[in-house]
Amino acid sequence: DVKVTQSSRYLVKRTGEKVFLECVQDMDHENMFWYRQDPGLGLRLIYFSYDVKMKEKGDIPEGYSVSREKKERFSLILESASTNQTSMYLCASSFARGYNSPLHFGNGTRLTVT
Amino acid sequence: RKEVEQDPGPFNVPEGATVAFNCTYSNSASQSFFWYRQDCRKEPKLLMSVYSSGNEDGRFTAQLNRASQYISLLIRDSKLSDSATYLCVVNMGNTDKLIFGTGTRLQVFP
C-alpha cells in the first residue's frame, strides 16, 4: 500500500515566519504534488514535480516555493507566512505521468497563521 | 464555466437507499476520471477510477458519458459509513493535470 507521510498534522505559525512542510512517499513514485484545500474552493494545486530537482508551478504558486532533492521527498516552503495561507495542505504522489495514474494523499497538515 | 462541477448537496438519504451523484466536466479531450471519498478533516482517498465502459466495485457503480461530458457515481444499499464528501476528479484536456470538483456531501441517516 502506498504511504505518503506529512511531517505535521497541525502547525501554528506567526505572520512573517518561514514555514517548511515536509512530505515523504515510500513507493518510488515519480510525481509529487502540493495542494491546499479551503472550504468552498476545493483542492487547488500549488506546485508539482515530475522528477528530482524538477518543479512546476500549479494554479496558485504565489507565496510558496518547493524543493525536491530526493525522489521520495517533496517540501513546500512558505517564504513569509501570511494569514491568507491558513489552510489544509495536502501532499500527494502518483506513479508516473500519463492517464489513469491516480493520486495518493498524505493525511494533511492543518496550518494556522496568526 | 468551471472545469469540473458537482452539486454540493448535501444529499440526506436513509440507510438502504440508492443515491446517485453526477459530475460535469468542460473539456471534451479529458481522458482520466476518478471518484475520491473524503471524510471530515481527513485526506481524500481514491474510491474508484471510471472507465469508458463503466465499472462496478461492490455497491458502487461509476459511469462515463462522453457525449454529455459527465461522470456519475451510484451507491446502492447506502450504509451509515458511506457518509462523506465525494470528489469528482478529471484530467485537464490533453494534459495529465488533475482537476478536482468541490465535492458532493452525502449524509446517510438511520
Image (tube, helix red, strand yellow):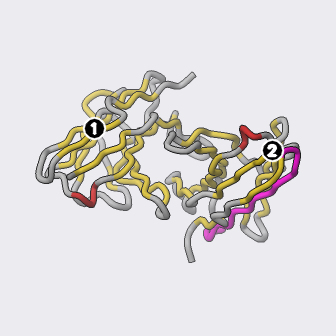
Give the farthest residue toward the left.
A16
| Residue B42 in the figure: left or right of residue A77 | right
Dot 1 surroundings within 10 Å: few (below 14), some, or many (20 or more)? many
Name the chain under label 1.
A
Q: Quadrant of residue B83?
A: top right
The residue labelled by disc 1 is: A21
The local secondary structure at tag 2 comes to loop
| Residue B63 in the figure: left or right of residue B106 | right
Residue at point 23% right, 51% down? A113
Specify whether residue B73 is painted magenta.
no
The local secondary structure at tag 1 comes to strand
Q: Amino acid at mark 1?
A: Leu
Per the model, the C-alpha gap separating discs 2 and 1 is 40 Å
Q: Which mark is residue A54?
A: none
Magenta segment:
B15-28
Name the chain under label 2.
B
Q: Which mark is residue B110?
A: 2
Q: Amino acid at mark 2?
A: Pro
In the rendered image of this protein, does residue A96 appear above or below residue A24?
Answer: below
Give the farthest residue toward the front.
B110
Q: Quadrant of residue A53?
A: top left
Q: Quadrant of residue B90?
A: bottom right
Specify whether residue B25 is painted magenta.
yes
> Where is residue B47 shown, x and y percent of the image?
68, 40
| Residue A61 in the figure: left or right of residue B58 | left
> Where is residue A61 shown, x and y percent of the image?
29, 57
